[in-house]
Amino acid sequence: MSAHASTVDPKKAELWDIHHHSHDVISTRTLGYFLYLLSDGMLFATLFAAYGVLSYQHSYFGGPTPAEFVKPWYTFGQTIALFLSVLAYGFGMNALKHKSKSGLINGMLAAFVLGVIFLVLDIHDMSHLYSMGITLASSGGMSAFMVLTQVHATHIFFGLIWILVMIAQVMTKGFTEETVGRLLTLRMFWHLQAVIWVFVYIFVYLWGYIS
Amino acid sequence: MLVDLPGGWSPLLGRLAWSQIPYANPILAPLFVAVVIGAIIILGLITYYGKWTYLWKEWLTTVDHKKLGVMYIIIGLVMLFRGFIDGLMIRTQQVWAVGPHSSGVFGSLHGYLTPFHFGQVYSAHGLIMILLAATPLLVGFMNIIVPIQVGARDMAYPYLNALGLWITAAAAALIMISLFVGDFAHNGWFEYAPIFELQYSPGVGVDYWMWTLQLVALGTTLGGINILATIIKMRAPGMTWGKLPIFVWTSLAANVIALTSFPALQVALGLVAADRYLGAHFFTAGMGGNLMLYTNLFWIWGHPEVYFVILPAFGMMSEIFPTFSEKPLFGYITMVLASMAIAGVSWLVWLHHFFTMGAGPFVNTAFSVATMLVGIPTGVKVFNWAFTMYRGRLTFNAAMLWAIGALFLLLVGGFTGMMLAIPAINYMVHNSVFVVAHFHSMLLVIVYAIFGSVLYWFPKVFGFKLDEFWAKTMFWLFSAGTVLVFVPMYMLGFMGMTRRLEYVFDTGWQSYLTVMELGIVVYVFSVLAFFILLYVSVRDHAKNRVGADAWGTSRSLEWMTHSPVPFYNFAVLPHINERDELAWRRQHGIDQVRPEHYEDIHMPNNTGVAIILGGLTFVLGFALTWRIWWLCIVSLLAIILLMIIRSFKGDPGYIITGAELQRMEEEAYRREAQVLDSHHSHPVSGGVVGNAMAYQRNDSSK
């Protein structure tokens, strides 16, 4: 097993990295951010598991169930807003390839506005439920419903702050290694939140509606 | 706020009040005085010697992975000591409070701890030992060793590394302050639903537990990302995956576990917080909550976490055995596969922590079989270590003794683990001290590997060896303590003694408990031996100085650079040709070859942001625990703002010129030559790559 024969001639071996090789900063950062997003995905996976366990009839304890109040068409509006936001971000990143600062900022602004629309629709929906007396204290099932959807909304909220920060950084600093790296990682973040929203929409809203 | 809070609450101080300070407690009040006096003495000494600037510039704001690693290890050792004192208190209570005629003091009917206080002690013992002793110690070693072993100048993200350390420090501070302000959780380190709900545990203990754990989880996730990215992206040229040292492989496996499993814990704790703070019903006994959901979510993290701490320990053993057997590690490929297999299986076994949940024969059998599967890769590792030592040229120094001790403990813990994996046996000994003895055997594997590593890598970090005599004394005392405490514990488990008894009803167990108390006293002596070891070694450090290759038989990259390691690690990054690069170079007589010229290198700047963020997370955790809402909002906003400001500033880093580098290197070589001359024993020895046999050594040099 340990018969690992030496294949390099020690007399000719290259011992030092003389031809100075440096690590690619942007790819190192995006890899790290990708790893963080994996853990974010695990976070949502766990929340989905909790939602699955707490979505039986008895989990609602005789109180309201999603079937009684979810409005798939209303939430579909949120879906479209978030997807268009991701699309706008994509157009902005396309402008980055052409080194167009204004194109990027326009795309980011559009992504920001659409994200705000998503969040406003969500807050309106939640305050409507609150006015009906449906809160996360209603039952175990409602706790799972509220926490899953609102943890996602919190991610969107912090993403929006980040978009603003990046618009400011691109305006003041232009396209540096740091800002471009952050634009890429923000794009990954924004995209993942849209992907997770697909699962939220299907498992919480559509499934909740038909069950 | 949606929940009815028992007790007082004010907008300014939340639940905090003078009555929360246990100044009347006969154990805590003197301790508090001692801590205050100790702190005043330490701060006074720092001021007297004018070391504040040094401390701030060299340590508190550093982004150097070695210094951060040392600070991780210091936190870990301090918390290990605290956890040990908790263990001493548990043992003393149990040997005292036996039978109805046992005496009681300090307001306790039997023994000296009231049930509520005893509950806090064992809960804090468990949480501290696993998450604030073992985890920081291992993360510290990964921090120091992994970047050097892969031939990098620093971690992939030095600033994030500092942030991870200070968040861990904040968690340690939070659990320590729970001693003197309020209470700690009293229902076990992993808690149970629904007893942690506000109506059953109205105090702040569960909140302290929850936010401490949440902070550790955050810090460890950040650290995990950093180590993974370092291993994937920062390897020196020529270091292919097949040439990675095993410690790096096990660190990789461990951090894959950390990255994927800690989010599950964060969610479990977040849902507890939703229950306690917002009145949600995730884990309540009524209103549609599900009690076992908590237990499942916790152990879905909890079991991978166990392997997160054991895998780096396996890596440490895999570094120590070959060095002191003077042979390459036996079965490198199988070792890699075994590490990855353990990481994979760690996800499939969580239910064995609660077979008695009653999930039914099919589920229990599936998890039983999955648990037994763990024995295969672990067995592979044990045999590999044994074959590494087989016909090797063994040196029984203290580091090697600790590693061998770890191997034996792994056998004891592993076989009892196999017993517990059988649901029929598990139903019999569930919640008994047999289980406690089993997982202490396993966790002691980690402690043994850590002390072995402290001895093994100490000269690399500080430039001198620790004293062999006191290191061995400590080892033998510690091992005697281990036997005396845990052999009777296994026996008591079979006799049916359940865990966490603050009053022992069966007087027939008195003799066993007395032996265990004797064992813990021997442990106390081993702790004293450790302090003497540190004192003697620092006193004699000039005598014990070492060169780059401290042991003369080491194999991996960290031994190619100077001891102590310069802040830039390698002046010129090495080009990797073989798996055990240093052993290969030594064998071919090219280990003293120096680079011909030096180029400019780029290093990151120090930053004070990380420690400030750590301080703010501590404030946030404290404010959340005591429900001081304005302080929560202020500290959270400060954290966000500081992160944004930092992102605008960035870190351009700085350049060390080739000329400067050459000057520093020559200085280091000169110092090293002096050290070796004064010893008159240039370590001439090494190992053979590609041969399982020990090779000829020039013994005249020893």
Image: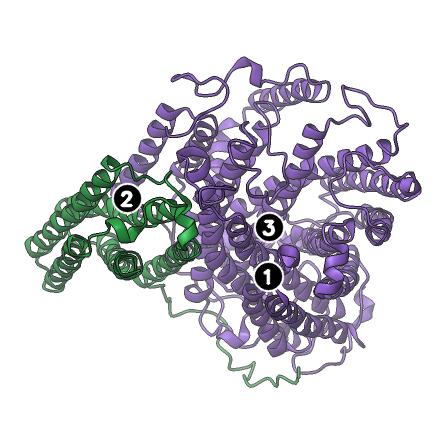
Chain colours: A green, B purple
> Where does the N terminus of chain B fall, quadrant-wise?
top left
Residue drawn at point x = 71 percent, y = 44 percent: B542
Q: Is residue B270 or residue B144 the one in the foreground?
A: B270
Q: Quadrant of residue B249?
A: bottom right
> Label 1 amino acid?
Ala
Instruction: Report how far apart the C-alphas of labels 1 and 2 lie in the structure.
Output: 50 Å
Residue B221 is situated, as x and y percent measured from the top left of the image, at 46, 51
In the displayed structure, B332 sits above or below B310; it is below
Q: In the rendered view, does B231 fall on the left or right side of B402?
A: left
The residue identified by callout 3 is B564
Which one is in front in this view, the residue at disc 2 or the one at disc 3? 2
Taking the view exactly as shown, the residue that stands out farthest to the front is A62
The residue identified by callout 2 is B647
Which one is in front in this view, the residue at disc 1 or the one at disc 2? 1
Q: In the rendered view, does B556 fall on the left or right side of B515?
A: left
Instruction: Report how far apart the C-alphas of labels 2 and 3 lie in the structure.
Output: 33 Å
> Label 2 amino acid?
Ser
The residue identified by callout 1 is B359
> Label 3 amino acid?
Pro
In the displayed structure, B420 sits above or below B58; it is below
Secondary structure at badge 1 equals loop
Marks 1 & 3, CB-CB < 8 Å contact: no
